[in-house]
Amino acid sequence: MVQIGEEQVYTIPLRDAKLAPRWERSKRAVKVMFRFLEQHTKTDRELIRIDPKISEKIWEHGSEKPPRKIRVKAMKFEDGIVEAELAAE
């Protein structure tokens, strides 16, 4: 769990995206990522801000082939906003 002002690196499993039809898998992977961050940072979906590089990484191979997992660095601020960016590999 992320404390206020603390940075945390998560490896988010995106395997649930494979349950969606092939043409919707990357879209589903983004939803899975947001749900994971909601649960682990204890914030609402509206307060989570993601870096465009995360979205580019998920959509890198198109809508049919998202990655199986992704490493994300999340930081929670005092006003409840969570900023997530791609972690260094």
Image: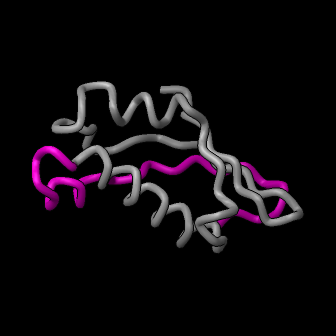
Q: Is residue 44 left or right of residue 27?
A: right
The image shows residue 26 at horizontal and vertical percentages of 28, 44
Residue most extreme to the left: 22
Magenta region includes residue 82: no
Q: Position of residue 72 (x, y in %)?
A: 53, 43
Q: Is residue 39 left or right of residue 20?
A: right
- Tally of marks: 0
Residue 22 pos. (x, y %): 11, 47
> Based on the displayed image, in which of its 4 quarters is residue 4 positioned?
bottom right
Give left or right: position of 59 versus 82: left
Residue farthest toward the right in the current orientation of the protein: 78
Q: Residue at x 36, y 36 (%)?
A: 58
Residue name at image x 63 percent, y 71 percent:
44
**Image position of 56 with respect to 9: above or below:** above
Q: Is residue 13 one of those drawn in magenta?
A: yes
Depth check, front residue: 46 or 85: 46
The way the protein has been coloured in the rendering is one colour
Residue occupying the point 55% across, 27% down: 88
Quadrant of the image containing the N terminus: bottom right
Taking the spot 24% from the left edge, 26% from the top edge, the residue there is 61
- The residue at the far front in this view is 23
The part of the image, by quadrant, that contains residue 46 is bottom right
Is 54 positioned to the left or the right of 49 in the image? left
Image: 46 above or below 66:
below
The part of the chain drawn in magenta is 1-24
